[in-house]
Amino acid sequence: MKKALIAAALFAAIGTAHADPVTLTHTDTFRNEQVGTLPNNSSWSGNPWNQGKPIQGNVYAGEFKFQTSEGLDFYAFCADIFHTLKSGTTYQMDALTTGSVAGIGSWEIARIGYLFDNYGNYLDKSANGKELTAFQLTMWEILFENGKNQGNQNGSSLSKGNFQVGGFGDADDLANTWINDIYKNAKEGEESKKYNLFFLTSSEHVSGKELTGYEQKCSKYKNGVCTKWKDDKTKPIYRDIYTQDSQNLISWVAKKDIEEDPNAPSEIPEPMPLVLLTAGLLALGFTRKLRCC
């Protein structure tokens, strides 16, 4: 009954675009056993959370498994190749819809939605290592490729263009097949029909200060009025420099899991994604922040 009550509350709360911060502990990654490579000759641009060079060299690709302080499991994919994953990070969660997240437009939303709708049957199963690695590679291609190199227009997509990755064996080939399907058949302006998608933005910390200028002092007066100003080098002005703590993520919840018939309550499948826990507790009036164990 308690799970049914949370599910009913979710139906009302899931449409909200903004939720309280949550803290996530990484417990596992479902992937194939091969380590791929992001080559040093790739070029990178266009993403607002790019605060420096991307991860280059050996990388893993797959579906992340996390746990909340309540002991509930949920899953997410990396949406950010510019930062490493740090367990115990606090995230702000937003509904992933057109215009909701800077740098992700209607085409990306449509293609990510198509990916989930057509290949989401592989999610949350550790035995599907190859498919979940391919899922992550496909998502990276959607988010980080651009222009004429999108899809398979110039051969194998993952080895061409702005975003390049390889070394994942059969998962590379599978991802290229999915990418070809997505770029041929996804329609701009559409969103996922089967899933509510969420973007999780990592917390930041002050990592330094940058000099932006100096307070001004008068260096020349005329008739009691200052006519010339100059920098007062004894009074510098600084701004804080913020550094992102961890990777940004994309998570989801199946729409069917939040459609609750009050006359025939059903159980929410376990384990549940983060979004089920967060939206449900908020709707039921729980105000205490979720914290890491």
Image (cartoon, helix red, strand yellow):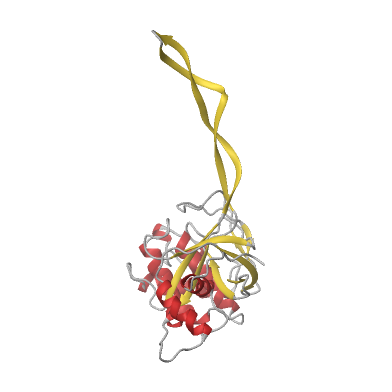
Which residue is pictured at 50% across the width and 59% down the height? 163
In the image, 82 versus 290, the foreground residue is 290
- Does the rendering let one see residue 72? yes
Q: Horizontal placement of 115 versus 293: left or right?
A: left
Which residue is pictured at 56% across the width and 83% down the height? 270
**How many numbered marks have been drawn onto this rendered protein structure?**
0
Which quarter of the rendering shows the C terminus?
bottom right
Which residue is pictured at 47% across the width and 78% down the height? 119
The answer to which quarter of the image holds residue 84 is bottom right
Which residue is pictured at 53% across the width and 21% down the height? 232
Q: Residue furthest bottom?
A: 264
Q: Position of residue 110 (x, y in %)?
A: 38, 69
Q: Position of residue 188 (x, y in %)?
A: 33, 67
Question: In the rendered view, would you say 79 is above or below 27?
Answer: above
Question: In the rendered view, would you say 88 is above or below 268?
Answer: above
Q: Position of residue 207 (x, y in %)?
A: 61, 45
Q: Position of residue 79 (x, y in %)?
A: 51, 63
In the image, 41 versus 244, the foreground residue is 244
- Does the rendering let one see residue 181? no
In the image, 165 versus 51, the foreground residue is 51
